[in-house]
Amino acid sequence: MRGKDEDTGDFLGPSRSAQRREALDVLELAKLLVELDPGRLAKLPLGEHLLPHIAQARRISSNIARKREIAFLAKQLRREDDDALDALRDALDVDGEAARLDTARLHRAEAWRERLLGEDADAALSALLDEFPGADRQRIRQLARNTLAERKANKPPRAFRELYREVRALLDADGAGGSGQPAGDESEDGLLQERL
C-alpha cells in the first residue's frame, strides 16, 4: 500500500498502474533478449548471471513453459538497477546513443580507409600515424598496396576488408580518446564526433 503523505496529501510511491506498466516493459525487454541472435547478445551490457536464463528460455520449445521462463527472466531483470536497464535499452535501441556512436565509428573507419587508398596515400598514412601512434605503419601500407593491386586485377576485396578491420581496430582501441576523424572531413559524422 503506497499511502499518502500526511502533510501534503501527495501519494508516497508509484501507483499500481505505473508499477504494472514498468513490469510489462521489462517483460517486453526479456522477450526481445530471448529473440536476439547470440552475436548481438554478446555485445550487450548484460550481467553474466542473466545469460543462463536467456539460454534456458531459448532451449524451451513448449509455449507455456517458454512464457514462464521469460517471465522469470523478467523478474531477474527487475532486480537490476535502473541505470543497467537503461543502458541495456539504449544498446538495443537502433536510434540509441550507443548505436549512433558505433555508426559514427564505422563511418570514420571507412573515411580513413578511402583516404589511405586515395591519391595522397602517403600524407593520409602520416596523418593516421599522428592520430594513432601505436598503428603498424608497415602493415597498413602493405594492406593499402594489396588493395590497389586487387582492384587492378579485379580480384575479391580481401585486403580491402582487412584494411578496414585494421583501421577499425585502431578506432576501437582509441575509444573516446581522440576524434579519429580524418582532417578536412566535414561530414555528418564529424559533427556527431564534435558533440562527443
Image (spheres, rainbow, N blue to C red):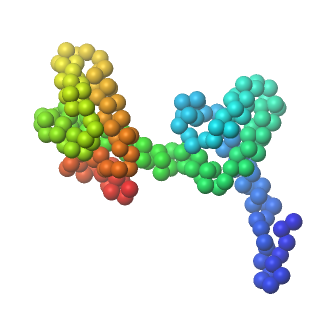
Name the quadrant containing residue 124: top left
Which residue is depicted at the point 21% across and 21% down? 146
In the picture provided, is 55 more to the left or to the right than 196? Answer: right
From where the camera sits, is residue 14 visible? yes
Residue at 75 percent of width and 37 percent of height: 70
Query: In this rendering, is residue 83 above or below 160?
Result: below
Q: Is residue 188 visible?
A: no
Residue at 61% x, 41% y is 46
Q: How many marks?
A: 0
Residue closest to the eye, 3 or 153: 3
Q: Nearer the viewer, residue 135 or 190?
A: 135
Up the image or down, 117 lies above or below 91; here it is above
Give the side of residue 109 with respect to residue 6, left or right.
Answer: left
Depth check: 125 or 10 in front? 125
Nearer the observer, 145 or 175: 175
Left or right: residue 69 versus residue 25 is right
Left or right of 97: which side holds 66? Answer: right
Question: Which quarter of the rendered picture does the C terminus lie within?
Answer: bottom left
* Residue lying farthest to the bottom in this orientation: 7
Residue 99 lies, in percent from the top left, at 47, 45
Question: Residue 55, located in which quarter of the rendered image?
Answer: top right
Residue at 81% in and 31% down: 65
Residue 140: quarter of image: top left
Q: Position of residue 16 (x, y in %)?
A: 81, 61
Q: Position of residue 26 (x, y in %)?
A: 70, 48
At which x and y percent is residue 133? 25, 41
Tell me the quadrant of the picture where the N terminus can be found: bottom right
Q: Residue furthest right?
A: 1
